[in-house]
Amino acid sequence: MAIGGKFAETRAISLNELLSSKQTLKVPRFQRNYAWSQEKAEALWNDIMARFEDVWYRSDHPVLDAQYLLGPIVLVNGKEQRRLFVIDGQQRLATITVLLCAARDIMFEYKEIEGVHRIDELLRYGFMGNYEWKLELNDTDKELFLELLTYEPDEITQIDRLKKRTFKTKSEKLLAGNYKVLYSAIMEFLNSTFNTETQKITGRKDGDNDNDAQYERVKKNVPMLNHFIEFIGEYNYVVMVMVSDDNTAFQIFETLNERGQTLSKSNLIKNHLLNCVNKDNTDLQRQLSDKWNAIFDDVIGQGQKDDDFIMESLRSRYFDTPHKISGKNLYKIIQEKFEDESSCKMYIEDLEKDAKFLSALNDPSSYPDDETRDEIRAMRLWDAKFIRTPILTAYRKWGTTQEYKTLVDILVKFFFKFRIVQQKHPGKVEDVMINQITRRIHDGQPLADIISVILANDNHEDFLYNFEHEFVPEPGKAGKYALQQITISMGTNNVDVKPIDDLTLEYILPKSHSKHWPDFLGSKPGKTKDFVPRLGNLTLLHHAIDIELKNNAFLEKRDAADAQGNPVGYKASNLKINTETVCNHNEWTPSIIEEREKMFREHADRIWNLESYGKNVGGS
């Protein structure tokens, strides 16, 4: 059945077909800046090269198998003649263009002029004697991208020129960085030795890496780039979705997101907000666009997904929306809630404020309160997303006052009990953290009332049972926090186990135990491996046990020393969790693990009993 109506021009097309169109491609001025990391550019290169080898080096390989789908691009065929606007797909198209520019510049350097003209035909479009580049990026990236497109080597190569150039934005650094990555990848490819009969890379001989030999080898192999460019155009496809208006483009963008594509709705949201600004007020549009880019590129950056940040900010501020605040509903909520210039401007300003604090939760080294910083570090180990929202809301209400510090302390302990140890369903955790606690903070209720809500949801006896019998922490995450708190409870000074990032979690009975621990179970029924992840089998160290000792017998790990006789095993640690519960044993058995878990439960009863918070706050 053919696609009709407004989606009639949806089809898979080769890059040759896309770039041979008589229409140029423009990224709207307010679209997201270039954001592909070096890893993504390298992954694209590796995928393309794998299929290029299938085509040119393996005559027995089905050619169709070498065709590569780069992904969807969504284009708006607007009112401007000969111009299409790129709503989705700019990152892939820009990186492919940078790859072609790097190949062209190498051909310039080695005087392979035929290939230079071939690439120009892909990247440029001529109309009535005038030439335009096929792809134009947004206002932020346009200048550097144009430099990459128009460069013609003379006395200095593009690589050397970029080394001397200063970059104004993060996206410029990414563009230049990926040019260098792809240039180097092409040169490495050309610096290989080919068997001319089989067209197969055979590698290089040892000692064949001097500069003259490399230059001659690259010069000899540069004509292979003609085949490579041909392959890029003919065998690489995109799914082109052509529509006539932004709303339809955004609808498709949302649909791709809901169907599992890794697309962020932040671009949709940005476009909606800026479209609400009076079109004649270009200064405000540019100001808000720059502010948005700074929030997501510089403040939040790689520390958090864009949509997660937007969702946390919304959940902390808005309880009057008819829709549940979720990833699926983000764009719909923003559309309905912010419809005019004033409200959109206010929303971006609110995002800017929230970004500064949430970026500190992503990177506790910049977190504003020394007393609760270690709780924030522990929280990061758990990927505890729902606890972040009430903490953000409390910080906005109270700053780093004593009320704030008390709330962070009890929230972290409650979340550990409720979600990590008792494994309450995420829906229940969300209800308590967002609908009950965050709402009350937002509404200005006193700390005593908020703590009452926490205590009403806290079942201490259930927690203790699960802590002793069911709690199997993930490596390096909740177990590190639990043992840190127990170590402090045993009498070790706080400063000796903080920050939590400096601690290493050690399995006393190791995962690879078959060689040195054959008699671990003795007469006890069961499987040795079942005891490995249990809390009673874990301890904390400041330095990991040497890899050569890691799987050895218990006494070897306990008493290990260096050549000067200094302890390097468990006896090297002065933490009481080691001196009093590990080094005082001459063997390591299931019974000792179970005894430690009973002892840990006694400490847990004191550490995570939240009743005192209610008494202290209630009496203040």
Image (tube, rainbow, N blue to C red):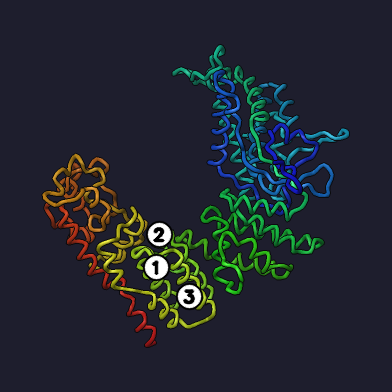
Q: Is residue 200 left or right of residue 496?
A: right
User: Disc number at residue 382?
Assistant: 2
Q: What element carries label 3?
A: helix
Indicate the secondary structure of the residue bearing disc 1: helix
Q: Tell me the residue at 27%/53% (across/down).
A: 533
Q: How far apart are marks 3 and 2 (CA)?
A: 21 Å
Residue kind at label 2, given as amino acid type: Trp
Q: What residue type is labelled 3?
A: Gln
Mark 2 burial class by Cα count in 10 Å: few <14, some 14-19, many 20+: some
Labels 3 and 1: the sequence-earlier one: 1
Picture quarter with the C terminus: bottom left
Residue wearing tag 3: 436
Earlier residue among tags 3 and 2: 2
Is disc 1 in contact with disc 2, using a CB cutoff of under 8 Å?
yes
In this image, 282 relative to 608: left or right? right
Q: Distance between the residues labelled 1 and 2?
A: 10 Å
Give the amino acid at mark 1: Phe
Residue at the extreme front of the image, as rendered: 1
